[in-house]
Image (cartoon, rainbow, N blue to C red):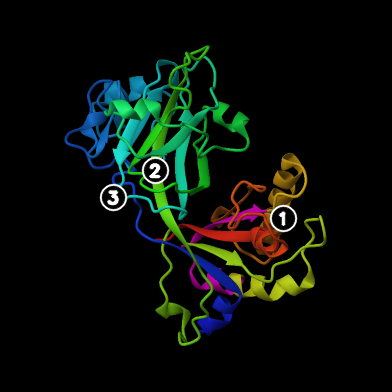
Amino acid sequence: MKFPLFTFLILLSKIIFSQNLVFNGDFETVERYPDNYAQISLATGWYTLNRADLYNSRSNPFYFNMAMPGLRTPRTGNGFAGIVVGEHETIQTKLTQTLSKDSQYRVEFYLKLAWCSQCALTPVFGLLTKYSCMDSIYRYENFNNQVGIYEYKELMDTTKWVKVEGIYTANGGEKYFTLTYINLFKKPFCLCDYFIDDISVYPLVDEHTILQNITSIDTFKYKQGDVFILKNVNFEFNQSTLLPESYKTLEELIKYLQKNSSIVISINGHTDNVGLEKYNYELSKERAKSVYNFLLNRGINKERLSYAGFGSTQPLNENTSEKNKQNNRRVEIKIVKKN
């Protein structure tokens, strides 16, 4: 049975991501498979200021397994990169498009701490810069914390990939994406090795168009990576209890997931900046969990669902007015996987 798509879209505000500005962010395109360390340049479009590693599951098994015992596979595909933070190793690529001043971009990548690391250094960030690391002027750019992660303790886990993501407002003119230890000129107190995979930088466009001319959900194609704001999903003040007015939106979401059984989603909670950061993080996480439990109780397989909270770290607008704060208090649905 088909049901109208426009009903669903009235209840959602879609944030459209266009093409990923990081070419070969999954390190799948290579000149040849690596057979030793310090071969990041074999990954098309990537280079380094000093040295960095490239791994591929199709490489010589001895090198691949020696480099990453216990990991065995990249996050996706066959390839991924690695940097030794204590040696200030750096990887960089040129974006497919220069960033526009005051435009917002969602930056996302995945890290995993290597088993042999002596510690976990948290200031490992993605940097968006105007200059290449090969240029001397690169050393004089202002390297601030652009993209980080709230629970830094997660970066100490050697058993799982951890997603690092954030919204970046461009200064204008940024052409390069870099992953490195944030303080390039201060020697860290220990050595640690991070594996890196699935890097993306997407322009953000907030679109509130209601597509009422689309009559069947089959005619609209959602892509992996699309994010939707669940409109009219509200909670008790300062709590994670869903209000009854939220049920209509969630029922439509359930119908969509039942119709598209191959889709896997992530439920992400966000708040404004009022209150303590830790409290906002916990509140956003609990609100996302409430939506997760609602879907779970209505028969959606838990293997298709995950949830996370980001507190006030990813605002859609500056928290300068009550309307902007209201927009920032939201629950998003991200299409994580679609076959």
Q: Nearer the viewer, residue 42 or 301?
A: 42
- Give the structural element (helix, strand or loop) at label 3: loop
Question: What kind of element bears circle 1?
Answer: helix
Q: In the depicted view, which residue is nearer to us: 57 or 197? A: 197
Of label 1 and label 3, which has the lower sequence position? 3
- In three-dimensional space, the C-alpha distance between marks 2 and 3, rounded to whole angstroms, equals 16 Å
Q: Quadrant of the C terminus?
A: bottom left
Amino acid identity at mark 1: Arg
Q: What residue does disc 2 label?
A: 198
Q: Residues within 10 Å of mark 2 (few under 14, many from 20)?
A: many
Amino acid carrying mark 2 in the image: Asp
Task: Give the residue at x 57% y 61%.
Answer: 333
Three-letter code for the amino acid on which mark 3 is drawn: Thr
Nearer the observer, disc 2 or disc 3? 3
Image position of 17 (left or right of 227): left
Label 1 to label 3, Cα distance in Å? 36 Å
The magenta region covers 254-270
Precedes in sequence: disc 2 or disc 3: 3
Q: Nearer the viewer, residue 159 or 240?
A: 240
Give the answer, above or below, for where 121 lies relative to 12: above
Q: Which residue is mark 3?
A: 96
Estimate how packed mark 3 is, as few (under 14), some (14 to 19) or many (20 or more) residues with alpha carbons within 10 Å. Answer: some
Marks 1, 3: nearer the viewer:
3
Please say whether residue 257 is one of the residues in the magenta stretch. yes
Is there CB contact under 8 Å for labels 2 and 1?
no
Residue at numbered disc 1: 287
Query: Residues at badges 1 and 3 in contact (C-beta under 8 Å)?
Result: no
Q: Position of residue 105 (x, y in %)?
A: 45, 52
Q: At numbered mark 2, what does the secondary structure look like: helix, strand or loop? A: strand
> Do the residues under discs 2 and 3 have CB atoms within 8 angstroms?
no
How packed mark 1 is, by other alpha carbons closer than 10 Å (few <14, some 14-19, many 20 or more), is many
